[in-house]
Amino acid sequence: MVSEAQVEKVDCSELLRHRHSIGESNYHLQFTPNFRKPVFLPRAVRELCKQAFEQKAAALGIIVYCVNFGPDHCHLFVGNCRNYSVSALVQYFKGYSSYIVRKTLWHVVSQYVWGERFWSEGYFYESTGRVTSRSVKFYIERQQGKHWTEEELLRFEKPEDGAQLHVFDFF
């Protein structure tokens, strides 16, 4: 178990500002080694895998908020992922870390996994943020209700005499 003091404090509540957008795109990813073996028992494997994740994230312009390991899985919390699909992120992180671990510590890892594969095929992901899907739905329904008052709807109806509306009729 990781203590509160061991977890690096990073503020991931700030919206990221880009040239033409503002927002957040964070993902919690969970990867499992092939055959769910306890490959992360040796500290060297955990440290090397964490370094590989951080190197790949830096190359992609992604922020690593947190990395943590169980004996047979790892959790990765990343942000600023707006330019990448989840499947692309998983491919980048698993591919690069597998390459580095197999190249550097295969003599340690090979006792836990069979064959040449380090990671299993599957993964877990969830998008995270400061709002829930329920609150977004509430916001959208409430805001749209403000736009469509009965008076405004009448402005868009076709005139009874069948005359065509002009753009200036709406101002």
Image (tube, grey):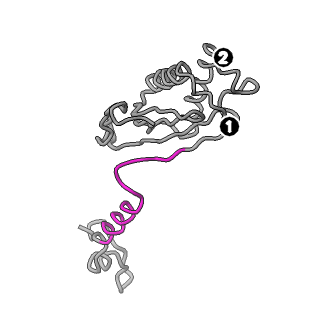
Q: Which residue is mark 2?
A: 106
Q: Nearer the viewer, residue 143 or 156?
A: 143
Q: Nearer the viewer, residue 57 or 47?
A: 47
Which secondary structure lies at badge 2? Answer: helix
Q: Nearer the viewer, residue 5 or 76?
A: 5
Q: Position of residue 31 (x, y in %)?
A: 58, 36
On the rendered structure, is 22 left or right of 134? left
| Residue at x 54%, y 39% (from the top left corner) | 30
Residue 87: within the magenta? no
> What residue range appears in magenta?
125-145
Q: In the rendered image, which quarter contains the N terminus? A: top left
Count of numbered badges drawn on the protein: 2
Q: Earlier in the sequence, mark 1 or mark 2?
A: 2
Which is the main secondary structure of the residues drawn in magenta? helix
On the rendered structure, is 113 left or right of 86? right
Q: Which residue is mark 1?
A: 121
Whether label 1 touches label 2, CB < 8 Å: no
Q: Nearer the viewer, mark 1 or mark 2?
A: 2
Label 1 is placed on what type of residue?
Answer: Glu
Picture quadrant of residue 16: top left
On the rendered structure, is 53 left or right of 33? left
Query: Which residue is farthest right?
Result: 115
How far is the residue under mark 1 from the one under mark 2?
Answer: 19 Å
Q: Position of residue 38 (x, y in %)?
A: 62, 31
Relative height, residue 71 to residue 124 (above, below): above
Query: Which residue is farthest left?
Result: 171
Relative height, residue 150 to residue 34 (above, below): below
Which secondary structure lies at badge 1? Answer: strand
Q: In the rendered image, which quarter contains the C terminus? A: bottom left
Q: Position of residue 124 (x, y in %)?
A: 57, 44
Relative height, residue 68 to residue 144 (above, below): above
